Amino acid sequence: MASGPVLDHQPRESVRTFTPRWRNRPLTDQRLAALLPARALPEGPLVPAEAFGREAPVVLEVGSGHGAAAIAYARTHPEADVVAVDVHLPGVARMLAAADEAGVGNLWVHAGDALPLLTDRVSPGSLSAVHLFFPDPWPKRRHAKRRFVQQHTLTLLASRLRPGGVLLVATDIDAYAEHCREQLAAHGAFDVVEGERPPWRPDDGFEAKGLRRGRTVSELRCTLRA
């Protein structure tokens, strides 16, 4: 008999959703030193009006990689402030350079883990949307606890989103899509609609790689219930 999904309602100690395995090249360090200070979040609790100089919708992207999606959203939604979060410093450096070249002034960057940022510094009800595009699927069953979408992360996201706020998830891994469906159904705080691909998101990076390999991209639009 097949067992049901594992529902982690509390974070597991020492379990991270990523594994830091990289070395910075000199160009990475140069870009971080030159470009990150102007786009970094201020220390302490995130107060959007103070951090961004205006009252505007705040959209946070978890695992932004090289920043193509975050930059595209910032360009097509100048009315919003976009916070791109990633632990991979070479990717962050490339994103900073691309954002500088694109001239987007509403993109902000946090080089670090999204979960402590959301837990300790983002205020309840302060986000309009959270984007999670092509996260590490951790395909082995014993590693499923490392997947970003869990009961405790959904509870955290639900607390940080405003009522009616949106969580967008995209993955080209069928097992991860099914994992998300199970976790969202068990959680119950979101209304989920599938199949709506954001027109502004570029189809490069992991998405393009997955399509070349014949995979299907699952799109989940999860709206927080009021």
Image: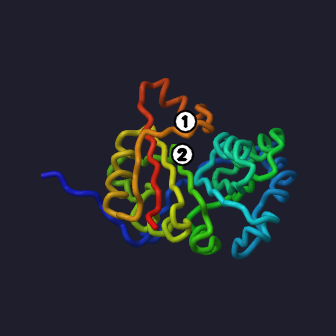
Callout 1–callout 2 Cβ contact below 8 Å: yes
Residue 101 screen position, x and y as percent: 83, 39
Q: How many marks?
A: 2
| Residue at the image position 40 percent from the left and 56 percent from the top | 191
| Residue at the image position 69 percent from the left and 75 percent from the top | 45
The residue labelled by disc 1 is: 206
Q: Amino acid at mark 1?
A: Phe
The residue labelled by disc 2 is: 133
Q: What is the number of the mark on residue 36?
A: none
How packed is label 1: few (under 14 Cα within 10 Å), some, or many (20 or more)?
some
Residue 176 screen position, x and y as percent: 39, 46
From the viewer's perspective, is residue 42 above or below residue 209?
below
How packed is label 2: few (under 14 Cα within 10 Å), some, or many (20 or more)?
many
Q: Amino acid at mark 2?
A: Phe
Label 1's element?
helix
Residue 139 screen position, x and y as percent: 38, 45
From the viewer's perspective, is residue 202 above or below residue 212?
below
Q: Nearer the viewer, mark 1 or mark 2?
A: 2
* Nearer the observer, 18 or 200: 200
Q: Earlier in the sequence, mark 1 or mark 2?
A: 2
The extreme left residue here reads: 1
* Nearer the observer, 115 or 33: 115
| Residue at the image position 44 percent from the left and 64 percent from the top | 225
